[in-house]
Amino acid sequence: MSNVPVAVVTGSNKGIGFAIVRALCKQFPGDVYLTARDPGRGQEAVAKLQEEGLHPLFHQLDIDDLQSIRALRDFLKEKYGGLNVLVNNAGIAFKVHDTTPFAVQAEVTLKTNFFGTRNVCMELLPLVKPYGKVVNVSSMVSSSALGRCSQELQQKFRSDTITEDELVKLMTKFVEDTKKSVHEKEGWPNTAYGVSKIGVTVLSRIQARMLNEKRKGDHILLNACCPGWVRTDMAGPKATKSPDEGAETPVYLALLPSDADGPHGQFLSDKTVRSW
Ligand code: NAP
């Protein structure tokens, strides 16, 4: 088994994830895994970084596929006995003018952004080694969508005692409510992406609390962040940050020094803790 530290970035064949891998290859003292659901796109991305003189490794990972997540889990367990850095970056967003029915957009978006991310966490968090770092890439849109929820939902999503089960039930309810076209009446904002990222931010707060309760002595730091508005296939060419700039906050959180006792359980943008 290798004692080399290991970092894993989900959805890193392009966009912000790719830039996070690039930065980690330069700054993380260990093996860095670029992962992609499509091995062809993944290997192409690895080759691009190799041309820059960097040496990422590759593993397939589709966060929508539990078997794929478990294959990565088993690989990390066997080869490294765990992992040191996990960046949950993979995500999707329908374009504003996409005419796919809203209920379908809600189901598909939540499936990857919330449920897929949660499944990766369920399988990989137990493997994170002491002093490890976990970064969940959320979005400022989670904050703005929170502000457009009913007071009752806002209170639940801001609660310091909400459980993961309760959060899963709420995310499931959102999808069900969109199918019945009652989501607005039920207090939800009209944004599937926004609700999925509320889920990611709240999940991060819950996970950090669980780490405090169950693994306090392990000094693991887990946070959610927004990369900013970044020029990628998701956000388009008008966005203000380059992918490398978008990678800065996630990479800052992934590389917090081992003597840091925070941030933990926070939501950050531009390396600054934001109120939730
Ligand atoms: P992007 O260019 O569209 O890249 C998304 C990445 O996620 C791609 O590598 C994609 O792989 C991967 N992915 C999607 N579904 C996946 C799945 N089921 N399993 C594994 N990988 C999957 O988007 P981006 O702008 O870099 O976004 C990265 C993260 O930042 C997302 O979580 C996004 O919500 C968040 N974010 C972005 C912005 C922004 O302005 N760009 C702002 C706030 C937050 P494929 O190539 O196979 O599709």
Image: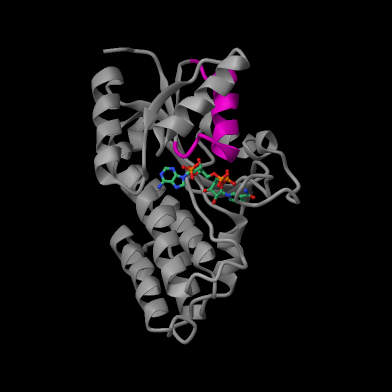
Q: Is residue 143 left or right of residue 31?
A: right
Position of the C terminus, as image quadrant, is bottom right
What secondary structure prevails in the magenta region?
Answer: helix
Position of the N terminus, as image quadrant, is top left
In magenta, the rendered stretch is 10-29
Relative height, residue 262 to residue 265 (above, below): above
Between residue 19 and residue 264, name the one nearer to us. 19
Residue 131: name its quadrant.
top left
How many callouts does the rendering have?
Answer: 0
Q: Is residue 21 left or right of residue 115?
A: right
Between residue 233 and residue 144, name the one nearer to us. 233
Residue 229 in sight here: yes
Magenta segment: does it hold 15? yes
Residue at horizontal 44 percent and vertical 38 percent from the top = 10
Residue 14: name its quadrant.
top right
Residue at horizontal 41 percent and vertical 37 percent from the top = 38
Q: Position of residue 225 (x, y in %)?
A: 56, 47
Relative height, residue 12 to residue 142 (above, below): above
Q: Is residue 13 left or right of residue 4?
A: right
Q: Position of residue 173 (x, y in %)?
A: 35, 73
Residue at horizontal 26 percent and vertical 45 percent from the top = 66
